Image (tube, rainbow, N blue to C red):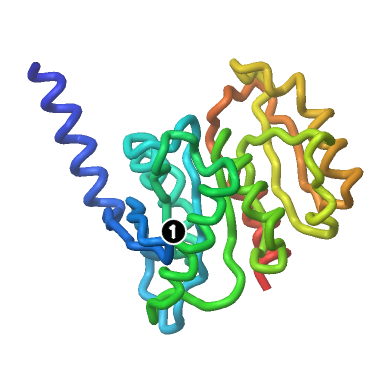
Amino acid sequence: MRKMKGLLLLVSLLFVSTGVAQERITLEDDSVLGVFMVRPAETQKESAPLLILMGGGPGNASISRDTSIWLGGGFSERGFFVAVPVSPNNRAFRGDENNRKVEQLIVELQKRDYIADGKVLLAGISNGGMSALEVARRNPDNYFGVVAVPALATSVVDNRPLAGFPVYLRIGGADQLGWADRFDETAEALTEAGVDLDAAILDSAPHMFRMNWDSLDAWLEKVIK
């Protein structure tokens, strides 16, 4: 019991120290979406670009909170206002209805003075990475690109709307779910559609891995314009 209390205290302190806040935001369709927010690490004179970051698995509150802390914090250090939405139905943000909720969330957040208008960066882990690709396919001109760490894609889905669109894809070489075995299929499906793809397998990395920020920083410098 003491260990459990200590763990809960540690998580709570980490939650506060990283500047993560939780909100409930009413969307245009009158549904309410839980969102974990991470403000930019440093005070900025100008409004911050928005990043929608989607967690893995079902995208529930626990996963989204953890994602906002360990990955959202890295993006906030790079000047992004990070929003990690909680899936309303434990299906990540896959499917047309959930895709639309991400679009509506962006509209609501960009009404705030401290969040920049215009293009948004999409990112996701596992199921969240595939959610990010789905959202981007709907209106790619609205987004800087997608950071999918990891995600899968197939030629069964029409990826042609993403022609010329920047995608940063990483899959762990020791992925416990066997996703490394589908890396070639995924890369081929995106490349054949004309995607501007930066893809690699990370040697010995598991399904969820530490971000190589040096590599990602170089990609961000090219796509955030």
> Tag count in the figure?
1
| Position above or below: 219 against 7 | below
Position of residue 19 measured from the top left corner of the image (x, y, whole percent): 28, 56
Describe residue 103's horizontal placement relative to residue 114 as left or right.
Answer: right
What amino acid type is highlighted by mark number 1?
Val
Describe residue 80's horizontal placement relative to residue 184 as left or right.
Answer: left
Residue, disc 1: 82
Rendered residue at 14%/19% (across/down): 3
User: Mark 1: few, some, or many residues within 10 Å (few <14, many ≥20)?
Assistant: many
Rendered residue at 58%/65% (across/down): 120
Quarter of the picture containing the C terminus is: bottom right
Describe residue 166's horizontal placement relative to residue 17 as left or right.
Answer: right
| Position above or below: 10 against 133 | above
Tell me the SS state at disc 1: strand
Quarter of the picture containing the N terminus is: top left
Rendered residue at 76%/41% (across/down): 199
Task: Give 137 or 215, whichever is nearer the viewer.
Answer: 137
| Position above or below: 67 against 117 | above
Position of residue 155 measured from the top left corner of the image (x, y, whole percent): 84, 36
| Position above or below: 203 against 116 | above
Task: Give 68 or 52, whichever is nearer the viewer.
Answer: 52
Position of residue 86 measured from the top left corner of the image (x, y, whole percent): 39, 45
Rendered residue at 56%/35% (across/down): 127
Residue extending furthest left? 2
Task: Give 167 or 30, whichever is nearer the viewer.
Answer: 30
Describe residue 124's horizontal placement relative to residue 66 as left or right.
Answer: right
Residue extending furthest front? 29
Position of residue 109 measured from the top left corner of the image (x, y, whole percent): 42, 69
